[in-house]
């Protein structure tokens, strides 16, 4: 368990500084409300996402290693990575570094801050659950999310198994449900919570990506959800920006807002959604919460 | 494309499977074709070929088919196959390895856009230390549209431009496009990594070419 004053390193990743800037803002805001101190690591670089692995093996390990080294040398023992793609590539790098000493020394030869591979990586859910365990939520939650039926969509990247033990069940994770239940939302089981939305194919192979998202959406609508919640900026952008396209393709009439989990926590804490920049979605996010009298 | 049982050569098959095992760090010998990966494969329906087929192709030593099929490029790296595999084979890593091998063989990918996309991403992020969405998308589209133009498919090029402008405009409206250049001060280190990777790739390619040449002789 963390001490209250303990600081956690924070790696935003490229997407949280660009297309999903408001997720960066929300993450910082929610954790400051909760009293968990997160500190952005100095001069981080891109982790290479899944593309580096398709280009070269060495590069795929070396790029995340630089960030691991920076965080470790600043004295952090844990690092929060909200973006699932970044989380997955850092986790993969850690696994490779552990099993291959020569690779580690090859990489360290180029680095100003050599990597020791001791840091622990945290998804945003893990850190939120930790805060919940310490009872940090209780005093902050001002309203219950009555009537909200969120589809907890984890995406494919956080349940990345390799041979690293992940904190949650890989096939049927429950972390997001635990938090949403605590906030008073009506969570339900559904079968597409870890399905892939095809974010890496959305641009270069849109046919495939639309089919994948169509399946997820169809299942969410059929299960009776009224919104989707995610933690991954890539899933959010993908399911949100292309929603009209794939829904039209699959003959789905409904449109579901795709929230970040931080936005729903914000609503429960009584933070105005405008302050969290939640209006920067493609599918309207404010209408549903207003309709349910949550704000 | 497929290999008949009569032309199966244990020696060449073994050298190929060992190469894939070494580069992907996955033990392909452990596969007993239970096809759990196939039932979980996200793009199985689109490609018509699933990880179990791919592993079978590799174990049979059918190099040409293994590096040149729809799954190798259309795999979205969701790693579902790996989470389901009872023998802990991460087939996602195998497709990644075969992608690299297919580039070394100079095979033109069935869907070249996918290759352009990942190249543009890696080049973008190693140039500045961080990915700039606008910049790398620009590079990707230049290559993609250029390809359409060179093959006189102007309609396709137009459609591509139109769809990207539509997305770009809606993203701009939502303030989700940013024109500021994002860089990392330590990008020299990243560039150095890129150089090492490119050098390694070039030597692998050379090695492979001499192998093919020897075989032909």
Image: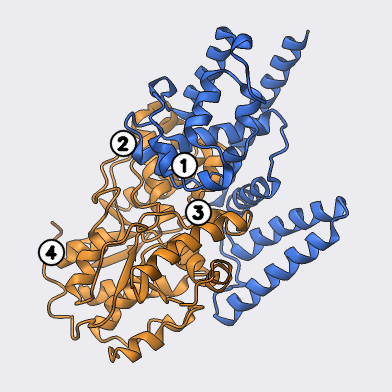
Chain colours: A orange, B blue
Q: Which of marks 1 and 3 is in front?
A: 3
- Label 4's element? helix
Which residue shows up at 27% across the image and 71% down it? A31
Near mark 1 (Cα within 10 A), the count class, few <14, some 14-19 or many ≥20, is many
Q: In this view, does A268 lie above or below B216?
A: below
Q: In this view, does A27 lie to the left or right of B110?
A: left
CA–CA distance between discs 4 and 3?
A: 32 Å
Disc 1 target residue = A111
Disc 3 target residue = A46
Q: Which of marks 2 and 3 is in front?
A: 2
- Label 3's element? loop
Q: In this view, does B26 lie above or below A153?
A: above
Q: Is residue A15 left or right of residue A1?
A: right
Disc 2 target residue = A163
Instruction: Work out which quarter of the rendered image holds the N terminus of chain B and state it.
Output: top right
Tell me where residue B180 sits by quadrant: bottom right
């Amino acid at each position: 368990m963390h001490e209250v004053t303990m600081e956690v390193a924070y790696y935003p990743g490229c997407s949280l500084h660009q297309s999903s800037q408001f997720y960066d803002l929300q993450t910082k805001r929610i954790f400051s409300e909760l009293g968990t101190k997160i500190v952005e690591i100095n001069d981080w670089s891109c982790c290479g996402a899944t593309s580096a692995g398709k280009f070269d093996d060495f590069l795929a390990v070396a790029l995340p290693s630089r960030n691991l080294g920076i965080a470790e040398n600043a004295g952090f023992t844990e690092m929060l990575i909200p973006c699932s793609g970044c989380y997955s590539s850092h986790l993969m790098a850690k696994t490779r570094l552990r099993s291959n000493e020569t690779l580690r020394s090859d990489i360290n030869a180029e680095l100003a801050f050599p990597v020791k591979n001791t840091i622990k990586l945290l998804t945003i859910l893990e850190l939120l659950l930790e805060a919940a365990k310490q009872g940090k939520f209780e005093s902050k939650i001002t309203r219950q999310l009555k009537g909200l039926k969120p589809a907890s969509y984890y995406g494919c990247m956080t349940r990345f198994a390799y041979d690293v033990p992940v904190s949650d069940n890989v096939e049927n994770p429950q972390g997001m449900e635990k938090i949403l239940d605590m906030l008073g939302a009506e969570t339900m089981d559904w079968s597409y919570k870890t399905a892939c939305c095809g974010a890496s194919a959305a641009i270069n192979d849109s046919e495939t990506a639309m089919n994948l998202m169509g399946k997820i959406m169809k299942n969410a609508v059929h299960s009776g959800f009224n919104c989707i919640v995610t933690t991954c900026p890539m899933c959010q952008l993908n399911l949100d920006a292309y929603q009209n396209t794939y829904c039209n393709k699959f003959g789905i009439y409904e449109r579901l807002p795709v929230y970040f989990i931080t936005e729903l926590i914000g609503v429960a804490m009584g933070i105005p959604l405008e302050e969290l920049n939640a209006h920067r979605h493609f599918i309207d996010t404010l209408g549903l919460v207003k309709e349910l009298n949550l704000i | 494309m497929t290999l008949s049982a009569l032309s199966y050569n244990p020696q060449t098959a073994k050298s190929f499977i060992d190469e894939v095992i070494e580069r992907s760090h996955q033990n392909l010998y452990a596969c007993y074709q239970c096809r759990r990966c196939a039932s979980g494969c996200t793009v199985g329906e689109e490609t018509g070929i699933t990880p179990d087929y791919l592993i079978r192709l590799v174990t049979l030593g059918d190099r040409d088919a293994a590096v040149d099929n729809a799954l190798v490029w259309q795999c979205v790296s969701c790693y579902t196959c790996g989470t389901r595999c009872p023998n802990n084979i991460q087939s996602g890593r195998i497709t990644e390895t075969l992608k690299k091998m297919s580039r070394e063989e100079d095979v033109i990918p069935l869907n070249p856009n996918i290759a352009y996309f990942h190249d543009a991403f890696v080049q973008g992020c190693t140039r500045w230390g961080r990915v700039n969405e606008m910049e790398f998308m620009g590079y990707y589209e230049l290559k993609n549209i250029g390809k359409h133009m060179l093959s006189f498919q102007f309609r396709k090029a137009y459609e591509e431009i139109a769809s990207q402008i539509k997305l770009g405009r809606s993203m701009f409206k939502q303030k989700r496009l940013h024109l500021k250049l994002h860089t990392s001060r330590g990008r020299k280190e990243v560039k150095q990594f890129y150089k090492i990777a490119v050098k390694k790739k070039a030597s692998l390619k050379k090695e492979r070419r001499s192998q093919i040449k020897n075989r032909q002789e």
